[in-house]
Image (cartoon, grey):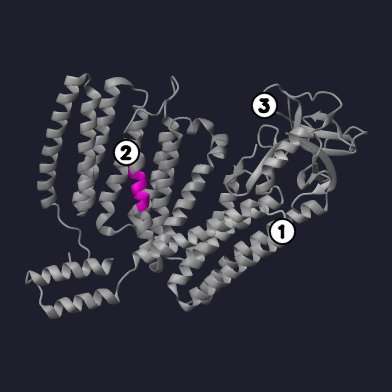
Amino acid sequence: MSRVFFVAVAAALALPVLALAALVGQQEMRLAHARILSVPLTGYDPRDLLQGHYILAQFDWSWEREPAAELYGGTDGALCVLNDAPRPRVRFLRGWKAGDRTDSDCTLIVVGMARLGPPRFAPRGLDDGYGLVRFYVPEERAGELEKLMRDRPGALTADLAVRSDGGAAIKALRVDGNVLGR
Amino acid sequence: MAIVIAEHFTRRWQAAGLIDDNLAARIVAWEAAHRRPVFLWAVAGMGALALSLGIMAIVGANWESIPAWLKLAVDLGLNAACAVAVFVFWRRGWPWRRELAALLLFGLVLSGIALIGQVYQLQSEPWRALVLWLALGTPFLALTAYSRLTGTIWLIAAVTTWFVADAPLLEYHGSLWSIGRELLQSYVAACAMIVIAILRSLWDPARGQGEFMSRLAWAGLIATCTLAVAFDWISPRDGETPVEPILLAAAVSVPAAVALWLGGARNERTILLALLASSLLTWSLGLLVAPMRGLSGDLLRALLFIFYWTGIGAVAATAGRRGLFGLAFAMIGVRLLILYFEAIGGLTATGLGLIGGGVLCLLLAAAGWRMARVVPRRARGAVT
C-alpha cells in the first residue's frame, strides 16, 4: 500500500472530526464577538428530523411605527434598535445594506426581513421563511414552554448575539431570566 | 442459508446419481469454507443503522441537564474514537469490523451536525446539513468501505439529499422543474449514479460494490421511465412545454453514455447504451404526452409503456438475463390487463374484460415460457 494512500485514508477519517470541531469553533467565535440583545418571544410542538423538538416563535419588538414592508412576502432591510430595555424599541430601515448610513439614534443594527400582518421581523439566517424562528428545546419541556409563551408573554426571551455587520445568532433561550439548556 | 441451499441441491444431485458421494462431500465442504453470510451482514448493518439512529434520537431529546460543552465534547470524542477504529480495522484488514465502524462513523457525523445545529440554535434548511454530511462522509467511505451494504446506504443518503434539496433547485431555475419535477430529479439522480457506480467499479477493491450500485442505478432509471408513462399524473399548465426538462435529461444522459462506453463491461456496452437511449426517449415522450387526457392519452401511454418494456425484454434476452426478461414479460402482461380495464365500462363489459384479460395473460405466459427457453444464460465463468 502506497504512502500517499495511507495519508489519504488518515486525512479522510480526520476530516469529519476536524470539520465538526471547526463548526463548533466558528459558532463560538460568532458569539464571542457579538453584543447581546434580549428579546421577548411570543407564540406547537413540532419535531425536526435531526435536531429534535422545537418551538416556533416570533420576536416581540416594540415598534416605533409599523414597518414599511410589502403586504405579501417580506421586505429586506435592517432593524434599528433605539433602546433595548425592557423590550427593544425598534424602527425598520427598508432596503438597508451593510455600509449604508444609519440613523444617529440607532444603538444597534440587525439585518433581516420585515413582514406585515402582524408586523414582525426576523434576523437573516434565523427566519423560517414566515418571519418566525425555531428554538430547539428539551423534549420533555416543549409543551410546557409552548403554553408558557401563550399564557405569560415575555416569560420566554432570547439572547441575540448581534455582530457589528448586523448579522445575528441565538446565544441562549431564557425562561424567566434563567438560561435553558446551556 | 446459502450453505443449506447448496447442501440441498448437492444431496438432490447425489440422489439422482449425477454426482458421487465423494464429490458431494467436497462440494458441501467447499461451500462451508467459502460461505458469504448475507444474513449476518444484513443483521450487522441493521445494528449499525439502529445505533446511529439511536444516537440521533438521544441528540434530538436535547437534554437540558447536560451542559452544551459536555454534549459537544462527548460527540466529538465518539466521532474521533470511531474514526480511529475504522483506521485500525482498515490497517489490519478486518473487513467486517471496518465496514460496520465506517457505517457507524457515517451516522455519528450526521448526529454531530445535528447536535451543533441544536446547541447553537442554527436555523439552516435540512438539505444544507445533509450536503455537509455527504461532503464529510463520502471521502472516508470511498477509501475504506467496499461492501455492497455500505454502497447501498451511501447511495440512499445521496439520493435522499438530492430530493430534499428541491427548494434551492426551484429557486435557481423554477421553470426547469415546473413539469414533472420528481421525474426530472429521479432521472438526473439515476444518470449521476450510473456514472458514480461505473467509476467506483473501476477500482479493484470496490468493484463488487460499484457493480451493485450500478444495478441499483439502472433499477432507478427504469422505474423513473416506467412511472413517466404509467399514469396521467403529470399536470402541466396550459401552454407549458417540457423542452427545458427534456434538454436537461438529454444533457445528463451524455456523461452516463460516455461512462458506459469507456468504463462499462465490453460485452454489454452496446445494449446498455441502447437501453439508455430508449429510456431517454420514453421519459421524454412521457412528458410530451402528459397533457393528453382521456382514452387517447391512456392508449398512447400504454403503448409507450409496452414499447419500453419490450425494449428492456430484448436487452435482457441479448444479455442473457432471464430474470429481467421474465420481469419485462410480466410488466407487459400487467399493463395489457390494465389497458383492458381502462378501455371498458359496465358490469357485463367488465366481466368480458376480465375473461379477455385472463386469456391474454395465459397466452402471454405460454409465449413467455417458450421464449425464456430460447434466451441464452449469461456467461458467469466456469459454470454457466
Same-chain check, marks 1 and 2 = yes
Tell me which chain the residue with mark 2 is part of. Answer: B
The picture places residue B251, in percent across and down from the top left corner, at 42, 42
Q: Characterize the magenta stretch by its predominant secondary structure.
A: helix
Residue under the image location 23 percent in, 44 percent down: B328
Please name the residue shown 22% across and 53% down the image: B321
Q: Which residues are magenta?
A: B216-222
Residue B202 seen: no
Q: Which residue is mark 1?
A: B66
The answer, for residue B247, to whether it is visible in the render is yes
Chain of the residue displaying label 1: B
- Residue under label 2, please give it: B226
Could you tell me how many numbered marks the image carries?
3
Q: Residues within 10 Å of mark 1 (few under 14, many from 20)?
A: few
Residue B231 rendering spot, x and y as whole percentages = 33, 30
Q: Residue type at mark 3?
A: Gly
Give the number of the mark in front: 1 or 3. 1
Of the two numbered discs 1 and 2 on the same chain, state the one appearing first in sequence: 1
